[in-house]
Image (cartoon, rainbow, N blue to C red):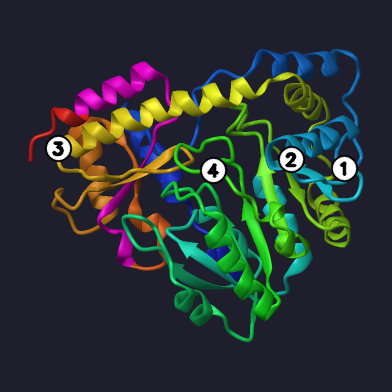
Amino acid sequence: MIQLSRRSAQITQSEIRAMSLACRAAGGINLSQGVCDTETPRTVLDGARDALYSGHNSYTRHDGITPLREAIAAKEFRDKGVTVDPDTEIVVTGGATGALYSAIMSLLDEGDEVIVFEPYYGYHVSTLQSAGIGIRYVRLAEPTWEFTDEQLIHAVSPKTKAILINTPSNPCGKVFTREELLRIGSVAEKYNLIIFSDEIYEYFVYSGTHVSPLSIPELRHRTVVVGGFSKTFSITGWRIGYTIAPAQITAAIGHISDLVYVCAPAPLQAGVAQGLMELTPEHYHELRDDHRIKRDMICNSLAKVGLNPTIPDGAYYLLADISRIKADSSRDRALKLLEMTGIAGVPGSAFFHDNSGDHLIRFCFAKDLPIIEECCRRFEALEF
């Protein structure tokens, strides 16, 4: 019998996909998977179409087409006041997942450790595990999702090489403040750690302001930003992501990305570049405001029936307390809720390394308004 690798044995089907399959079998409403129903901007589609028909269907530079790298650099300056060199500090990758994988493979060795805040995004942890990286967990405290300096320092070991943050965060919607980033940076400076900052939800901020460690001068040299356009432009299937990092790190990331992905899809890069160049700030403001309305609607409905949510400051997910549903685990509770309402969420255990999330469920509210309205009606009809 052929045996799988130890690496493969560590990676199992995510609860997100498992609940999506259960939802499909039940004919339910899928609030488990982070697929945004917002329409893709027409200029993004037109840019990709024009590139297709004008023959841009071959390999690009391994680090992405020049217009897209320049558009990303312009976006960073416009939104964060950060000057980025598009030729030496940006790599366009196969989605944000490909960006993080390439960064991890470029900077970490098997046996190294990374500090991860939990609740965490499962693919972050799985990507680290697939590379043979150990994980040190720092628990964010409900309901405000805060951490202490003592927690962070206690998580550092002689093998620790990096800290991974997700701001705004999936699944809890935490937006790290400048003060918190400075505290993280102080520990990173003391122990010479890399900061991986996944900022894919940068335009979904409802309270406070998105702050990137890239914009903090004393953290710039040790920061690797992971970003992408799947969420902002509703193009999860296009797989266009990027990294921003100091030139030496960027070169190494580019080599790994080239080895694994060769390049991101050529005409789709062009579509994203056109969208970045032509869409005004109002587009992003409207996107944020639209999702804030949906957040408030679904949070209010959940609170009415005692499935108390923590109100997310960013991203488009929320965690709700489903301990009122009597079952042995969060997965059983999520399946029972699917049976009761026809609505699928992700069991809270998917976001913790132990059973600490058994009272939680994650819902995605990036859906068309009529779907959110129907979910609210079903939640409010619940009887326990």
**Mark 3 vs mark 2: which is more N-terminal?**
2
Task: Give the secondary structure at mark 1.
Answer: loop
> Image quadrant for the C terminus?
top left
Mark 1 or 4: the one toward you: 4
Q: Is residue 300 visible?
A: yes
Mark 2 or 4: the one toward you: 4
Residue 86 marker: 1
| Label 3 environment density (alpha carbons within 10 Å; few <14, some 14–19, many ≥20) | some
Residue 290 spot, x, y in % from top left: 45, 23
**Mark 1 vs mark 4: which is more N-terminal?**
1
Q: Amino acid at mark 3?
A: Val
Q: Which residue is mark 4?
A: 209
Q: Which residue is mark 2?
A: 76
| Label 4 environment density (alpha carbons within 10 Å; few <14, some 14–19, many ≥20) | some
Residue 305 marker: 3
> Image quadrant for the N terminus?
bottom right
**Mark 1 vs mark 2: which is more N-terminal?**
2
Q: Is residue 281 magenta?
A: no
Which stretch did the figure color magenta?
A: 355-378
Q: CA distance from mark 1 to mark 2?
A: 11 Å
The residue that appears at 68% across and 50% down in the rendered structure is 226
Q: CA distance from mark 3 to mark 2?
A: 42 Å
Which residue is at the front of the view, 274 or 105? 274
Mark 1 or 2: the one toward you: 2
